[in-house]
Amino acid sequence: MAISAAAGTTTPITAMRAPDRPRRSRATCRAAACCRRCARPMMRAATWSARIPATGACRSTSSARATSARQRPISSPSPRRTPARSASRSPARRSRTATCSIWVQARSASCSVPNIAANMAATIPTSRCRRATSSASTRARGRAAAMTSRKPIPRLAVPLLANIPLIKKLEVNGAYRYSYYSTAAKSVNTYSGGVVWSLIDDLSLRGQYSRAVRAPTVSDLYSGSSQDFPAATDPCTTAVAVTNTNLNASCVSTGVPASLIGTAYDGGSTQIQTVNGGNPALREETSDTYTGGIVLQPRFLPRFSLTVDYYKIKIANYISTVGTTNLIRACYGDADNGYTPYNASYCSSLPRDSNSYAITDAVNTLANTGGVTTRGVDFEARYGLPLGFGAFGAESSKLDFRVSGTRLIAFNYNPLAAISDLTINCAGKFGQTCGNPYAKWRLSSRTTYSTGPVTVSVLYRYLSPVKDDDSGTVYAVERIKAYHYFDLTAAFDIKPGFTWSVGVNNIFDKQPPIMGDNQQQANTYPSTYDPYGRAFFVSTNVKF
């Protein structure tokens, strides 16, 4: 993915550890403006007490948080697919890590806002995050197409007031980047602006606006065609096609003999052969992100911090496949509108076999869809409790508590830009249109006890219930219940520079939901629910 976002100023923060957060999808990475080289989402800070080192691991800025660990992803989007991935990835491998470092220390437009990554874990359909394969010649052509010349990144941080009543510190920041692509995006501008207002030492308010751009990748533009068999039903084989005059007329006009309408002339298949691939006519995505939040570190409660952030993200020209189910709805209508075609021109994307009359090779290549708008609240609380006793030769020990989560208020996705009536709110849903489950609540809580050379921690992960997004079709599984996971980890400092860790994920061997037709792959959603069950692991960390 090519990323370009405006950059701002560095903010002192404390980073989250990736293992503490639900695992994220490539979709989420894409949307959260992750580093292309490391393919990891940026981590959000709980407090502003330490400065994140700039590394290729793409850790977070003070206002962007990712929910990443074993769940997913998230996706999201990439989640695919916060907002849109921006458009300034360096074409040279040697510069990718450096570019990541710039984003982290400069607070890019995509990662300067709170909560983007955290929410996208629950908001970007992974089913639309595809990495199509291509031939060597296509890759060569794509490399030339993806070349870009970037301009320097002006950054500005201006302290306005300090140490007066109700204003401990007032600071504004801004950034701007210009990029040029030889294909698709051409000239693009990304920028951001924000304000930090510390009323007192205990309380700070912050807000940020960011514009980001994601140019189509080489794969998006030039990947070859491939076949897929998504779950979908030909509406002309259903009983309602016989009784509903609108649907009956549409079936006849698209080539189905009147005598076959309402029969299983396609063999009763619940899948439709579909063609996927790139699209050289794609345009760049653009995103506008608005965030506002509060940081609380009360002096009367040392070692406690609380952050709460609201976000709203809008992605225009969102690059994705429309989906075979949505093409069928556009052509034939659905139960909600009495099976009146929304736009009959989309029937050309659903050709029928001249002998069997079954829909064959539905055209579902990448397109600039109608976009995504999402809103939510992200929060995190931390507390450290020193203890007056210890073990393993230590005289003291410490308990650390962390609770974080995301409340997804809305995730509105429009698969077809020309038909706004097809917009669906995917919050609390999953299925053929929404893709991965978008739980309204995602929580993560870790309790850690450390004494001497030993650290033991327990991680709890929670996903709220979700339901299928297709009200017109009854599937084997219409609702997925809430999921609870528990992980245990123990780390031992054997000697300076050498740490040995052992643990178990999914302690109670919670099995993923078995879906049937409306699933991602392997008869479930493996990018959201743990498909492996209880799993033990051992790791070492050596520093030279």
Image (tube, rainbow, N blue to C red):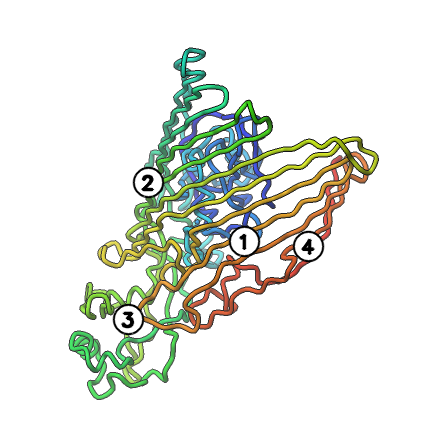
Q: Nearer the viewer, mark 4 or mark 2?
A: 4
Between the C-alphas of marks 1 and 2, the distance is 37 Å
- 318 vs 246: above or below: above
User: Cα distance, mark 2 to mark 3?
Assistant: 33 Å
Q: Where residue 147 appears, x then y in whole percent?
A: 42, 41
Question: Along the horizontal axis of the image, is 384 left or right of 250?
Answer: right
How many marks on residues? 4
Q: Which mark is residue 186?
A: 2
- Crowd band around label 4 with a 10 angstrom C-alpha radius: few (<14), some (14–19), many (20+): some
SS category of the residue bearing label 1: loop
Q: Nearer the viewer, residue 212 or 468?
A: 468
Residue 180 image offset from top left, x and y in percent: 36, 36
Mark 1 is surrounded, within 10 Å at the Cα level, by few (under 14), some (14 to 19) or many (20 or more) other residues, namely many
Secondary structure at badge 2 equals: loop
Residue kind at label 3, given as amino acid type: Leu
Mark 3 residue element: loop
Q: CA distance from mark 4 to mark 3?
A: 48 Å
The residue that label 1 is drawn on is 71
The residue indicated by pointer 4 is 504
The residue shown at (16%, 77%) is: 245
